[in-house]
Amino acid sequence: MTAQRRHIWLCADDYGAAPGVSAAIRELISRRRINATSVMVAAPHFDNKEAAALARLNSSEKRAALGLHVTLTGPLRPLSAHFSPLRHGRFLPLNAMLRLATARRLRPEPLANEIAAQLQKFVDVFGRPPDFLDGHQHIHLFPQVRDAFLKVVAERASTAWVRQCGRARRGRRLRDHKALVLDILSLGFRRKARKLGIAVNPAFAGSYAFKSRPDYARLFPRFLSGLPDGGLIMCHPGVVDTALKSLDSLTSLREQEFAYFGSDAFLQVLAEHNVALARPH
């Protein structure tokens, strides 16, 4: 008996982070190699021109779901007034935000105001709410942040779904410590989202140690293992440019992912696993 084909979301994060990242994501969407991207509206290189170029890809038919990539970590700056805590006018680094969130020392109102400001900018530039929302560096899963994040979604983007980052049971590898932390953080996040009536993706994959210089072509098939219909794989394709180097330490691996998704090998792996990209509605 032939197994039923699974339809998944392959979501490129960080649209708007740098011109080379945005151009690479648009190319993959135009070639139907990915079917979702989350937009970093707080990035200094995101503007109306980048938004229009992305929106045009959906003008005749919808090729990609467009989401908001909520950003609350440095070196970016807030869009809202009076956000705190800051360091030299910028968001704190990830580890500092995690410590404060775990200790519940963040103030809910500035968090909600900033998330709402980023959501409003998305609406302003695209003319509609996002299809989904997630968080840069998974910050939307953190204690306190998740409460503000889900509150804003429930009040201002009730038709959107949100990204949870828990893996499918069949796809779990216990030695993957980063993914294990995301599994744990996603437990409470899913529970709170469902209580508010907010939809979530059934499973998540795509996390790996960016510092270990992995072979992405060998790594990607693992993400498909056990991923159910409707599951989401996160990716970070891009072309390295000066703007990206000034913003993010994740550089050369983006080019490796970009090359892989543009290759015949990628299509072959999808076919071997009886997987296709979901069609955005």
Image: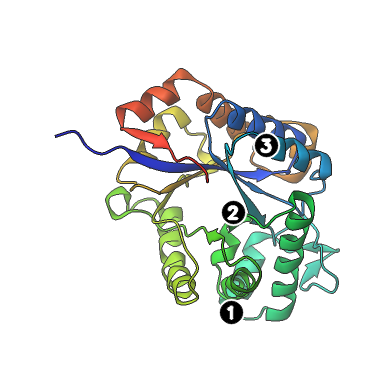
Mark 1 / mark 3, whichever is N-terminal: 3
Q: Judge whether 173 appears above or below 244 on screen.
A: below
Q: Which amino acid does label 3 sit on?
A: Ser
Using the image as rendered, state which of residue 108 and residue 214 is in the foreground: 108
Query: Which residue, as the protein is rendered here, is positioned at the far front?
Result: 60
Q: How is the image coloured?
A: rainbow
Rate crowding at label 1 as few (under 14), some (14 to 19) or many (20 or more) other CA atoms within 10 Å: few
Q: Judge whether 38 appears above or below 2 on screen.
A: below
Where is residue 185 drawn, in percent x and y? 46, 66
Where is residue 100 drawn, in percent x and y? 64, 74
Quadrant of residue 147 within the rendered picture = bottom right
Where is residue 40 drawn, in percent x and y? 70, 50
Q: What residue type is labelled 1?
A: Ala
Using the image as rendered, state which of residue 64 and residue 227 is in the foreground: 64
Where is residue 54 drawn, in percent x and y? 70, 38
Q: Judge whether 42 appears above or below 159 on screen.
A: above
Please give left or right for residue 240 compared with residue 161 in the image: right
Residue indicated by mark 3:
59
Spatial distance from mark 1 to mark 3, Cα to Cα? Answer: 45 Å
Q: At 66% across and 32% down in the image, what residue appears?
A: 26
Residue 131 numbered tag: 2
Q: At 75% across and 53% down in the image, what residue appears?
A: 127
Query: Which residue, as the protein is rendered here, is positioned at the far top?
Result: 264
